[in-house]
Amino acid sequence: MNVKIMGIMGINIIIAISIFVSQGKCQTTAPPPPRLFSACSINKNCDSCVPHAKCLWCFATNNCTDYPVTWLLPPASLCPLSQARWGVCWLNFEALIIALAVVAGTILISISVCVCGVQSLCCMCSASVTMPDRDEERFARRREEIRQRAEERKVERQSKHDEIRRKYGLMGDSDHPYSKFENE
């Protein structure tokens, strides 16, 4: 059961990631033409470009451009993903996407394992609370049988003792022929 859930979740994660990654390539309109003067165009190297959240450095063209905010990912016509840098110079967009996908997948798998583990633990606890164990039932039946046999032996012993008492006149009732004569 858990393997099926994990497989379905894995497929859903792959579909979500492929949709996420392909958003930049599905646009039919061309990227907007670069403005003549922008705050990013004055930066001439990656280190001065990427600290600005609105700027994107492209190693293929060695220029700093405005990040295309209409796309989730920069389109290939602006800069290939392997050559685009945003935030830091040492991490390209492809590695960023892979890293985010791995982290998201790990988090989802961890959550599903925790949920399945808690659910199975709860099911085991509720089953043991509602239904007594087979061994407990067997021990309870055995205890009851032993108690009944002990009660039967006790009644049998008591009847034998009473018979002996009646025989030797040790009982207080006078309905048997060997009862003691009382002085009047």
Image (cartoon, grey):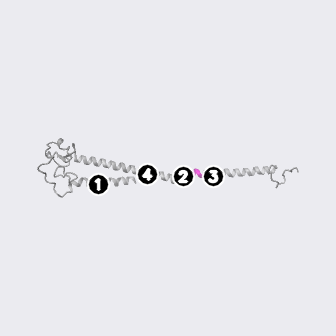
Query: Dot 2 corresponds to which residue?
Result: 134
Residue 162, image x and y in percent? 76, 51
User: Where does the magenta region start and end?
Assistant: 136-141
Question: How far apart are the alpha carbons under marks 4 and 1?
Answer: 28 Å
**Secondary structure under badge 4?**
helix
Query: Disc 1 versus disc 2: distance between alpha carbons?
Result: 47 Å
**Is 92 displayed left or right of 170 in the figure?**
left
Q: Which residue is mark 4?
A: 120
- As measured in the structure, the alpha-carbon distance from the residue carrying label 1 to the one carrying label 3 is 64 Å
Q: Nearer the viewer, mark 4 or mark 2?
A: 4
- Amino acid type, label 2: Arg
Q: Which residue is mark 1?
A: 16
Q: Earlier in the sequence, mark 4 or mark 2?
A: 4
Q: Which residue is mark 3?
A: 145
* x and y, in percent, of residue 121 in the image: 44, 50
Q: For the residue marked with disc 3, what is the amino acid?
A: Glu
Tell me: 69 left or right of 6: left
Q: Are marks 4 and 3 in contact (CB under 8 Å)?
A: no
